[in-house]
Amino acid sequence: MKTINFFTDLFLVFVASDASAWIIRNATETLTGTNLTINKSEMGDDGLASIPKSRRKRYISQDDMIAILDYHNKVRANVFPPAGNMEYMLWDEGLARSAEAWAATCIWEHGPPYLLRYLGQNLSVRTGYYRSILQLVKPWYDEVRDYAFPYPRDCNPRCPMRCYGPMCTHYTQMVWASSNRVGCAIQTCYNMVVWGAVWREATYLVCNYSPKGNWIGEAPYRVGVPCSACPPSFGGSCSNNMCFPAINSNFMYWFK
C-alpha cells in the first residue's frame, strides 16, 4: 500500500496497488481540561444532502469483532516505550450500537456531536475487495512510524484543512491506556460522498472508544514496567503486559 498524501486536518488517504482506496479519520483531539471535541466540517451541506437514503446494512460478524479486539490488545501490549498502566481492552456492545447507528448514516464525518463529547472515534473507509477487517484497522496502527512518545513530533492534528504532513491520532487513540472499551460497526454504503467525490460502493468502519483519549498535552500512557502502575480497581491483576479486569472472559460483551 502506498501513501499518497497526509491531510493533517485529521485526514489520511491511502491508495492500494489494485486501485482500491482507503481513507481514515479520527476525531478525539480535545483541549486539555475540557470535555469538548474539536470537529471541523470537511464537506459542504450540498455534499451531505446528496447521499441517498437507500443503503444495504452489513452487520459486523463475530469473527470481525474478535479480530478487531484482539488486534487492539496486541498493539497495546507491545507499545514502545513499554507502558506501566496499559489497560486490557474489552468489547462493549453499547459502543458497537452507537457506532452502528452512525455508520448507517453513510456520512463521511465524525458524529454524532453530542456523543463525541464523551467518546473517542476512529473512522476508515475503502472501496474494492478486501480479505480481512484488519485491512481497515491496520492503517491506524501504521501511524506509529510518525509518532514520538510522549507527544506527536512531526504530527499536527490541529492543522487547518488540506495541509500536508503525517498524523498520529488514530494510533494514539488505539493505545490510550485508559480507553479500555471499544465497539465497532461496518456498513456498506452506496453513492457515499468522501472528500467531495462520490464512491459508488464503500465499506465504512466506525469504532467508538470509551473513555475517550487523545487529550492534547497528555501522553497516551505512563512509561514503566508493564502493570507497575495499574489503577487500584484492577487489584494488581496483569495479563500480557496489561492491567487485567476482574472478569475472566469478555464473552458477555461480544454476544449480549
Image (cartoon, grey):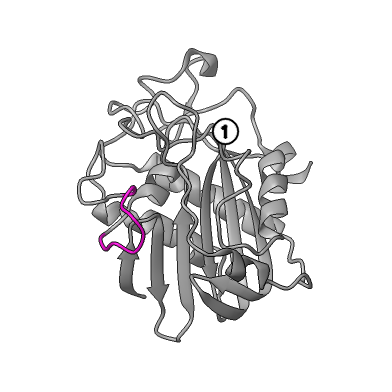
Tell me the quarter of the image containing the N terminus.
Answer: bottom left
Relative placement, left or right, of 168 versus 94 is left
Q: Main secondary structure of the magenta part?
A: loop
Q: Residue at x 63, y 59 (%)?
A: 64
Quarter residue 143 falls in = bottom left
Quarter residue 216 falls in = top left
Can residue 207 be found in the magenta stretch?
no
Quarter residue 166 falls in = bottom left
Across and down, in percent, residue 227 comes to: 39, 24
Across and down, in percent, residue 197 comes to: 52, 78
Across and down, in percent, residue 207 comes to: 58, 50
Which span is picked out in magenta? 157-165
Q: Residue at x 43, y 32 (%)?
A: 177
Across and down, in percent, residue 249 comes to: 66, 35
Q: Residue at x 39, y 26 (%)?
A: 85
| Residue type, mark 1 in image | Tyr
What is the residue that sits farthest to the bottom in this orientation? 18
Q: Is residue 52 above or below residue 91?
A: below
Closer to us: 74 or 6: 6
Residue holding disc 1: 118
